[in-house]
Amino acid sequence: MFNLILCEIICSFGVQFKRIKFNYKMTDFGIIEALKELGLKETNNGTSTGSTNFSNGEIIESYSPVDGRLIGKVIATSKEDYEKVMHSATKAYQSFRNIPAPQRGEIVRQFGNKLRALKEPLGKLVSYEMGKSLQEGYGEVQEMIDICDFAVGLSRQLNGQTIPSERPGHVMREQWHPIGVVGIISAFNFPVAVWAWNTALAWICGDVCVWKGSEKTPLCTVACQNIIAEILKENNLPEGISCIINGDYKVGEMMTTDPRIPLISATGSSRMGRIVGATVAQRFGKSLLELGGNNAIIITPSADLKVVVPGAVFGAVGTCGQRCTSTRRLIIHEAVYDKVRDAIVGAYQQIKIGNPLDETKHVGPLIDKDSVNTYLAAIESAKKEGGNVLVEGGVLEGEEYQSGCYVKPAIIEAENHYKIVQHETFAPILYLMKYGGDVENAIEKQNGVAQGLSSAIMTNELKEAEKFLSYAGSDCGIANVNIGTSGAEIGGAFGGEKETGGGRESGSDAWKVYMRRQTNTINYSDELPLAQGIKFDL
């Protein structure tokens, strides 16, 4: 049984076993070659307007959580550097918006093709600098490719609408215009895909972008800029269409307080979102906030265990629990609780932890030792509140785990009201809890947290599934049936409610946030009738 479960889990990770001898040296996995292919150097300028690179700030050293090695250095952005970026960006916008949208889509198409050619080295860099499994690193680059494909088609569909007017000889219409300079703040856990989600759409809308990636993954930021810079140069486009800045939150504040940036798209914690949202609102700017999740899977009596186990396990331990869509809670009906609990615990015993570039490993490290400390503190908090540990956590030691960032995924029986359960811990900790009676009781627990990103129900009962998807069901932006909480397809709008921030990225009509809406009324008659039947005779 457990072997079958393990096979399911491995398939969910997309793991392909290879007969390679690993000795955990950086060169064994082609990292040095990947860095060269991506145009990365020992020390890199962290500020760029395209092909022009410069920086005068402090040095950021990027150490891999995989083996603790120094990968490279990035020079952060100073205030003066930022002003140069904004000068280029605002100037570029004046000309870029004049290019027809399908032609802007052609630029994005070329970018997508370049990503296809560099999928392997960029995926390796993501895995090595962030710590996610190699297949997840490749998958993240594939997300970039997919959003480019989506955006290319969208570039011919930025449609408004015609609206009937109440006045004779009049017509109303709605159209969409570029918004200007878009500021992007992304997090370490998806160091390249979130940028692409935003930029691919913003570019086809006629906007230019300034991106501050995470200071924990600065080389990914520089690598992406190197890729798009080549495309822009080949098409004789001006500096400023794609810009990057690097540094800590102080560099981010340069954007959030800047009235020249009408839209800030920020991905990160709810705490960060409160600050960004309030700061941008003070200057009447727009915010697209993608914040924390506290995601649950409801498991009903009719649930298929072959679906439940791989969905729950990957959701909980994939990216070492560092996805905003990671599964944090399993809400299991009491009638099947023991069976589901034992299957999940059994599957955990077969999880292989180690170098994420080794494709025989399922789980890599946490991003840094601060995250390790947060993980340990969360486990202790759960114990103090009465949690029953089913699978012990802890930090792994030994040559293979020399970075000090490898931890064991933990499972804890808990209650939904526990303070630590209500909090999103960015680590592989899974809380199990029971529910009894009808599915409404499970939905109440599912909704009983401050966050509202992703949710799922495992059931073969149509009524339960439809109840979960109804207005009286999940209060999350994402609600799934018979799949886990983790992972999102490009075609749908991604985002959540409540403390998740309310923003939407990627598919559906998410493109509209990168544009400004304009309503037009055209009078083609010889008269001037007023709305609402008002008379004004002179």
Image: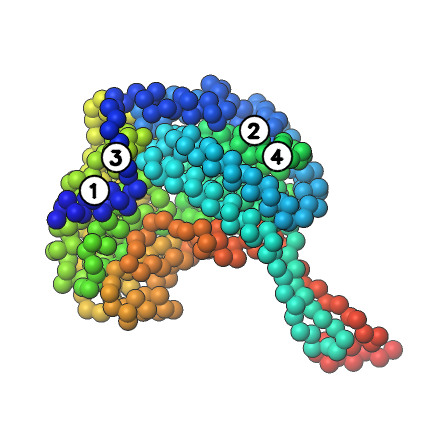
- State which mark lies toward you, 3 or 1: 3
Nearer to the camera, 446 or 243: 243
In this view, the mark in front (4 or 3): 3
Q: CA distance from mark 3 to mark 1?
A: 25 Å
Q: Which residue is mark 1?
A: 410
Residues tagged 1 and 4 counted as in contact (Cβ below 8 A): no
Q: What's the residue type where badge 1 is placed?
A: Ala
- Looking at the image, tell me whether mark 3 or mark 2 is earlier in sequence order: 3
Crowd class of label 2 (few under 14; some 14 to 19; many from 20; radius 10 Å): many
- Residue at x 48% of width, y 53% of height: 507
Cα–Cα span, label 4 and label 2: 17 Å
How many numbered marks are there? 4
Between label 1 and label 4, give the one nearer the viewer: 4
The residue that mark 3 highlights is 17
Residue 281 in view of the camera? no
> What residue is disc 2 on?
47
